[in-house]
Image: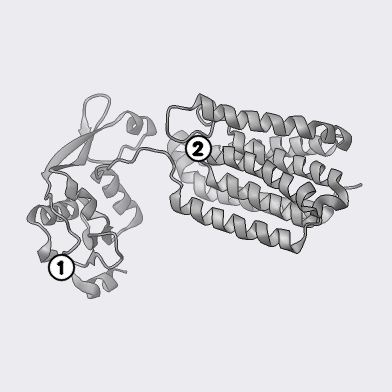
Amino acid sequence: MGADPWLLLLTGIMLAFGLVMVYSASWDVSWRLTLDPSALFRRQLTNMLIALIACAIAYRFPLRWLKGLALPMIVVAMLTLLSVLLINAGGGPRRSFLEGSVQPSEMAKLIVIIYLAVWMESKGERISEWGYGFLPLMVIIGIVGGLILLQPDLSAVLTVGVVALVMFYLAGARASQSFVVTLGSGLVGFLLVRVTTTGRERRCGWLDLVALRFAVRLNGMTSLALTKLDVLSEFEEIPVCVRYRLRDGAETSDFPAHQSDFHSASPVYETLPGWREPLDAVEDIEGLPAPARRYVEFVEREAEVEVNLIGTGAERERVLMPRGLEALALRA
């Protein structure tokens, strides 16, 4: 059976579009890292060519061999997913080996597709039976999805689940089975979005005025939205980074031009007094505690741009406009 020309054409269009997006998004970073705007693009292009060669080899791979390898491959995928959890058992996200170079969940996506294709073919018309086709499929997806979820990697879980559902439907599943799976998947997905966390420790990072000034100049900002000011209410003192100390000991208030200087730089803080009182009930700028107002004024002065929105609480209504709505509209 020959290759599908329309599928090849669509794949080629998507690859070309992806390469354009990669260059558009990476040329500036590539210039700052290597002084070559196309370095990251060429690396991506090389990876794409390697992937195309791998696809060509896989296309020539005998199907009967692939059928024989499907079961060992899914077992290896499950063991690898379990291994990444055990090896990275110290807390935080547990998704990869070798400092992010190898992600078992990405490998599992492809292997699940191969295994389910072989498994569903072996079931034939009995795939629609609840005990013979439906329940075993749920067990397989449950094990793989559960191992991925423990990492946690919600996007990979959703990918595996959606692909399995589509394959099951195309293989001959009943409408009632598809409805049960869709309803159950939607409920589980909703619960996961509500309760799943990344596992990373959360901490309050101090404002970096050096980077902010650089962003203001680079983007031509005319006003700032200072969000989550209420988060700082817990602190007696609030450090703010006003300069960088470079590796030679010199201090600069300008953003380093070279990546190596930036990586070796350490922040120089100026400490401002905190206010230690909630801001949820504040209705206008005059209602802010004096230290909070001084903090906002300090940011404006150092960043050389006005702060026209100040977030003071979790609700959408907890926003102050120091200069009124008209000033905000003029700056838009």
Apparent side of residue 117 relative to residue 203 in the rendered image (left or right) = right
Apparent side of residue 206 relative to residue 276 in the rendered image (left or right) = right
Determine the CA span between mark 2 and mark 1: 49 Å
Residue 42 in sight from this viewpoint: no
Which residue in the protein does label 1 denote? Answer: 284
Residue 88 spot, x, y in % from top left: 49, 27
Residue most extreme to the front: 131
Which residue is found at the position 43% from the left and 34% from the top? 92
User: For this rendering, which residue is in front, 105 or 42?
Assistant: 105
The amino acid type of the residue labelled 1 equals Asp
Residue most extreme to the right: 1
User: For this rendering, which residue is in front, 73 or 322?
Assistant: 73
Residue 82 spot, x, y in % from top left: 58, 30
User: For this rendering, which residue is in front, 235 or 261?
Assistant: 235
Residue 293 spot, x, y in % from top left: 12, 57
Task: Give neighbour class at mark 2: few <14, some 14-19, many 20+ (Cα, 10 Å).
Answer: some
Badge 1 element: loop
Task: Give neighbour class at mark 1: few <14, some 14-19, many 20+ (Cα, 10 Å).
Answer: some
Residue 74 spot, x, y in % from top left: 71, 34
The amino acid type of the residue labelled 2 equals Asp
Which residue in the protein does label 2 denote? Answer: 36
Badge 2 element: loop
Q: Which mark is residue 17?
A: none
User: For this rendering, which residue is in front, 21 or 195?
Assistant: 195
- Frontmost of labels 2 and 1 is 1
* Vertical comparison of 95 with 4: above or below: above
Apparent side of residue 118 relative to residue 15 in the rendered image (left or right) = right
